[in-house]
Amino acid sequence: MTRTFYSRCVCVLVIIGLLAGLLIGCGGPQKPTPPTDKTPKTEKTTPKPEQPKPEEPKPEQPKPEEPKPPEPKPEQPKPEEPKPPEPKPSPTPEDDPMAAKVSSFAPAEDLENQVTAYLKEFDKAVASEEDYKDFAEKLIKDANAFAVICLTLGLHDQDNKYKARAGAMIKAAQQLAATTDLAAARKAIEAVKAAAENDPTESHPLKWEKVADLSQLMKAVPTINTRLRRQVQPARFKSRAKETAGYSAVLAAIAHASIVDTSEAKNDEQIKQWTQFCVEMRKEAAAVNAAIRAGNQAECDAAIERLTVSCDKCHEVFHKEAIGKTGDESEK
């Protein structure tokens, strides 16, 4: 009974305590516990080493502005430089008949051979007083033709031994053509031979120009043509080829050089006709030369006939009295 009593007392006391606690908690805020000198004991722990704090990035200092390069000025258009003149194309024989290469109608070798032949003829013409009387007129014609031969060699596109001497030879030939007596003729012939054998002491610039009397050249043409026609006969065609090639080359040279001498023409129309006749004569004389060099008798004969026709056409306009006489002149 006693135990039951004590147990009930304890239960009552517990209930009373619980009710008192509830009443206290509901009655208002609890007063803070006054501080005491005693601090709660804490467990001893090993202090961790402080981790280095990452450096805060420094704010970037603003870079001083670099001076801007000056803006390029717009290029001023350069004044156009004058273009050099375009080289003009070389004239063709069709545009300028004097532009034809001399080798295309008169080989230098054939003209060189004629220089030697003419010098021998000069000596024969002055061998005696009687010879001079017989050949004085022919000497004048030959001297004029010789001047043209020299000019052609001097301006030739093929090298030759008279090229540098041509100027002095022309001058001497012109002096010979002007002689009127035996003594003067002999002296002039010596000067011609000296000019042909020696290099000149002074230069003689050459160009295509009148170097001979045209009337004397036209008198020389039939004489040369007569020799040509006689020497190209079948019995002599091959044996006289050196001489006949020379004759045809001289005829071509005379035709070419005569283009620049229009003294026979009276007007522009006749100048055109004169030029065309000279070109035709040069063409056919060149054909004769080529046929002789090739040893072609038939072509040579045909070219000689065409050459004769070209001469007669010219004579119909300029010298009707000479029609049909080409090739019929004596060799004097």
Image: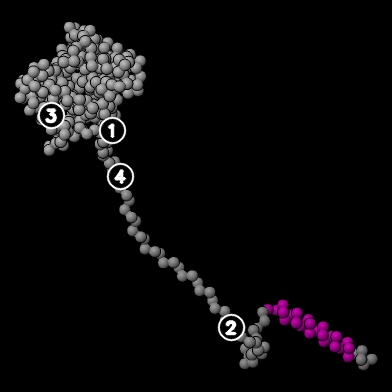
Residue 120 forms part of the magenta stretch? no
Tell me the residue that label 4 is attached to: 75
Between 292 and 132, the residue placed more toward the observer is 132
Q: How is the image coloured?
A: one colour
Pointer 3 with pointer 1, Cβ within 8 A: no
- Mark 4 residue element: loop
Pointer 4 with pointer 1, Cβ within 8 A: no
Mark 3 crowd level (few <14, some 14–19, many ≥20, 10 Å Cα):
many
Q: Give the label, 2 or 4, closer to the camera.
A: 4
- Residue numbers of the magenta segment: 6-28
Quadrant containing the C terminus is top left
Hey, what amino acid is under mark 3? Val
Q: Give the label, 4 or 3, closer to the camera.
A: 3
Mark 2 crowd level (few <14, some 14–19, many ≥20, 10 Å Cα):
few
Tell me the residue that label 2 is attached to: 49
The answer to whether residue 165 of the structure is visible from this angle is yes
* Mark found first going from the N terminus, 2 or 1: 2
Q: CA distance from mark 3 to mark 1?
A: 44 Å
Tell me the residue that label 1 is attached to: 86
Tell me the residue that label 3 is attached to: 192
Between 291 and 73, the residue placed more toward the observer is 291
Pointer 2 with pointer 3, Cβ within 8 A: no
Hey, what amino acid is under mark 2? Pro
Mark 4 crowd level (few <14, some 14–19, many ≥20, 10 Å Cα):
few
* Mark found first going from the N terminus, 4 or 3: 4
Q: Residue at x 27, y 24 (%)?
A: 242
Q: CA distance from mark 2 to mark 3?
A: 129 Å
* Mark found first going from the N terminus, 3 or 1: 1
